[in-house]
Amino acid sequence: DIVMTQSPDSLAVSLGERATINCKSSQSVLYISNDENYLAWYQQKPGQPPKLLIYWASTRESGVPDRFSGSGSATDFTLTISSLQAEDVAIYYCQQYYSTPPTFGQGTKVEIK
Amino acid sequence: EVQLVESGGGLVQPGRSLRLSCAASGFTFDYYGMHWVRQPPGKGLEWVAGLSYNSRTIGYADSVKGRFTISRDNAKNFLYLQMNSLRDEDTALYYCVKDLGTYYNGNPFDYWGQGTLVAVSS
């Protein structure tokens, strides 16, 4: 199984400041034949199910604010919230869907400083 | 609007069985792969099982293989999870999840239900 490791486990950021979450996979999730990274990011607010934010490492899901962006390739990925808003308080998970079983990172909790 | 509504959770003793159901609406159910993903209280996400749009390809997590069975009824727009030989470590919120594609692998998960809680305890 591909192990997904996120860092940090939690972070506190001031409103309007940048938040950066890292995700590392134990093996590459870049599919050479189509040059796509099989990596998604999800947001889970308290008491709610996860919500898809980003897929193919950098494609924003419809309706997701453009302050959320994804980057990276192969084994190292980043989710950036460019200007943190109060409604962004949540746990964020990365997920690889390159191979079965699809696996998730342990989650990163984002709070307001 | 896509809706996924789970039911069937509850408190069950170790070794017993439970069947979860998921009613899907708001999309063409028989076009898409579907999954069950679980989340133990206060913990992270674990994929449990998935199947393709036509049920011809199915996958399970090692932790449930041989005990759980995923299935779907495309005529009724329902997804199921038959859980046998339940263990304490199966205690979790179980989410019904829609795949972005037709199979159960190679695509992200674009819609999640609210979940149904399964508690295994004597």
Image: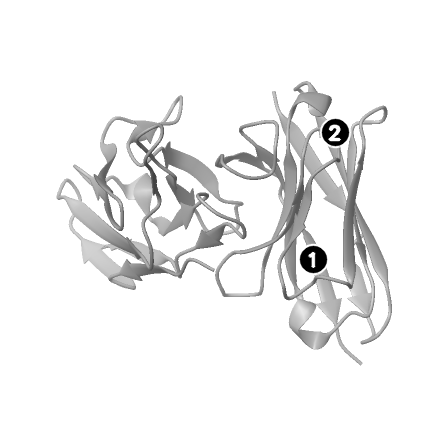
Q: Earlier in the sequence, mark 2 or mark 1?
A: 2
Taking the spot 24% from the left edge, 34% from the top edge, the residue there is A69
Which numbered circle lies on residue B54? Answer: 2
Image side of residue A66 versus residue B61, left or right: left
Question: Eyeballing the image, is A5 above or below A13?
Answer: below
- Residue B100: x percent and y percent? 53, 29
Q: Amino acid at mark 2?
A: Asn
Q: Amino acid at mark 1?
A: Leu
Image side of residue B69 versus residue B46, left or right: right
Label 1, on which residue? B117
Taking the spot 68% from the left edge, 67% from the top edge, the residue there is B90
Taking the spot 41% from the left edge, 43% from the top edge, the residue there is A42
> Is the residue marked by circle 1 packed among few (<14), some (14-19), or many (20+) residues within 10 Å?
many
Q: Chain of mark 2?
A: B
In the foreground, B84 or A92? B84
Instruction: Kindly tell me whether residue B115 is visible in this rendering.
Output: no
- Residue B25: x percent and y percent? 71, 24
